[in-house]
Amino acid sequence: MTVRNQTAAVVELTLAELLPLSDSREWHRAACRGDPHHEAWFPYPSQDFDYARGVCAGCPIRAACAEFAARTGQSGVWGGHEFDRGQLIRP
C-alpha cells in the first residue's frame, strides 16, 4: 500500500503499520511484522497464499490473529488461514 502525504512524497507502509495495533497488545509479536510483501497477505483470489501461510506457521499470535479476522470481517491471510469478509475460506 502506498500513501501520499501532504508534501506529495510517497511513503511505503510496512505490514506492521497496517495491522490493527490497537486491538491487541500482542501484535508486536506477529511473525509478519515488518514484512514488505503486502500483496502476499491480501492477494487477489487467484494468487498464491503459500508465502503468507509459511510466515504464519511459526507465529506466536496465530490463533488470536485468525480470531480477529473472523470477528471483524477481514479478508486475506490471517493466522495462516484464508478469509473473505470474516468467513473462513481455507484453514
Image (spheres, helix red, strand yellow):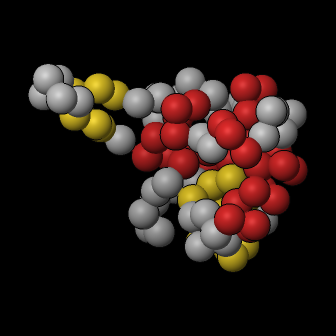
| Nearest to the observer: residue 28 or residue 75 | 28
Q: Is residue 53 left or right of 64 when viewed as pictured?
A: left
Q: Position of residue 34 (x, y in %)?
A: 56, 24
Q: Quadrant of residue 67?
A: bottom right
Q: Position of residue 6 (x, y in %)?
A: 18, 29
Q: Is residue 19 left or right of 60 when viewed as pictured?
A: left
Residue pictured at 59% horizontal, 73% vertical: 85
Total marks in image: 0
Q: Quadrant of residue 19?
A: top right
Relative height, residue 10 to residue 51 (above, below): above
Q: Quadrant of residue 32?
A: top right
Residue pictured at 61% horizontal, 49% vertical: 50
Q: Position of residue 56 (x, y in %)?
A: 74, 41
Can the viewer see residue 50?
yes
Quadrant, the N terminus: top left
Can the viewer see residue 83?
no
Residue pictured at 52% horizontal, 32% vertical: 17
Residue pictured at 49% horizontal, 54% vertical: 42
